[in-house]
Image (spheres, rainbow, N blue to C red):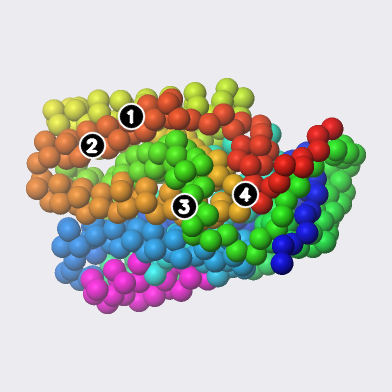
Amino acid sequence: MEKKKIRTNIPFRLDRLPWSPWHVLVVIALGITWILDGLEVTIVGVISDVLTKPSTLALTDFEAGFLGTAYLIGAVVGAIFFSYLTDKYGRKKLFMITLGTYIAGTLLSAVSFNFISIATFRTITGLGIGGEYSAINSAIDELIPARVRGWVDLAINGSWWIGTIMGSALSLYILNPAIFPINLGWRLAFFLGASLAFAVLLIRRYLPESPRWLLIHGREEEANSVVSQIENKVKDQTKKTLDNVHKYITIIPRDVIGFKTVGKTVFKTYPKRTVLGLWLMAGQAFLYNAIFFTYSLILSTFYHIPADQVGLYIFPFAVGNFFGPLILGRLFDTYGRKKMISVTYILSGGLLAFTGYLFYLGILNALTQTLAWVVIFFFASAGASSAYLTVSEVFPVEIRAMAIAFFYAVGTALGGVASPAIFGALIATKQPLFLFYGYLLGAGLMAAAGVVEILFGVNAERKSLEEVAKPITEVEEEVAE
């Protein structure tokens, strides 16, 4: 039996809301995902050299680098598995479950006893983070007003670097053998990450389900109730009168969107957007995962930096990465998606190739290498954040979580899963030339993704999600003002 049609203005009511403390709560409660991911990547990066010591887990350089790959394998599987559940059972249920999975994996990582155990526990941690990507990106895009969606998304994705800053600062203390025994400090880092996640888990209980998700599943009254509550909170907090909304869409709800429909939408309806999403995700995944999962190995092997001092070099690097999306983000809403994404990708790729050449020549030291990376990743960070923004807004709401998961999983599998292990092997040769080849590969992937953006990019700035990608459930009965 076909469900009745629903004529609604809910998406446009959400998009016309003024910025308020309620939106800040959404950003804090959901944006923590990127902070936790940044913390995880940084911790594994800075402790990788420590874990090769006989008094800890005695890993080889390859095994230490593989921990990043194990984490990413888990993230890829988690993204696919949890995304289907996110689109089927709702954003709220799943962003509670995925964060709980992350907490379990992180706590287990803290009590690892050999390579097999820590690789397994890092995979579980990755499952939670991968699931978070689809559940959180879906919820954020569906709750944030269209006019600031680009800047907010980039700023939230850029908050990954707050986690990096926290991890690097933490490493200066917990990896200092004068303060903690060498086999205790790295374990404490994981415990602290889990503690932060548990605190956020409590905050998330107060967030609502996405009204857009409720609508497409036929729960119109609940969706209207949620939006009304949000509007009342925003009016009370901002003391502003909300404009009336006269724009509507008409949909026929569906309980389940099958994989056949997902495949048809992604590959037949939007083939150019599919190519675009894969290139953007793969390019940035290779670059970031290669550099950060092996950061301490590069500093220790080629510049002889002690493990307890690595954080000093990561800190300014992370600050530059955080301010890239924060400062450049508004231009993605004003100057435009296509122009800004292509510029950030191509520019960062070119700068990486040039810096890699200087590294090969032996011109750089630990300080100048870090300064060069600060400049490169100021732009690359904005570009990488825009990849997640792109795949989360250019596909219909009904398959948003699965689309995000697909591009994250396939893009990461193509560009990111193998890169930490590859760079770990290149570093193990102790030959600058081989590492330079790795840098060239990363630079080429970034620049190529920038060219694909020029060809297939979508001008989604300041548009409702329903205008960027027509809902699958929408029927041709839209009534405009």
Secondary structure beneath label 2: helix
Residue with the most extreme front position: 1
The amino acid type, in three-letter code, at marker 1 is Ala
The amino acid type, in three-letter code, at marker 3 is Gly
The amino acid type, in three-letter code, at marker 4 is Ile
The amino acid type, in three-letter code, at marker 2 is Leu
Q: Earlier in the sequence, mark 1 or mark 4?
A: 1
Of residues 349 and 56, which is closer to you in this image? 349
Residue 325 drawn at (x, y percent): 51, 35
- Res. 95 in view: no
Of residues 67 and 364, which is closer to you in this image? 67
Q: Is residue 221 above or below residue 419?
A: below
Gap in angstroms between the C-alphas marked 2 and 1: 10 Å
**Main SS type for the magenta part?**
helix
Residue holding disc 1: 447
Residue holding disc 2: 441
Residue holding disc 4: 472
- Res. 394 in view: yes
Residue holding disc 3: 263
Secondary structure beneath label 4: loop
Q: Residue at x 77, y 54 (%)?
A: 5
Asked whether residue 439 is drawn in magenta, I would say no
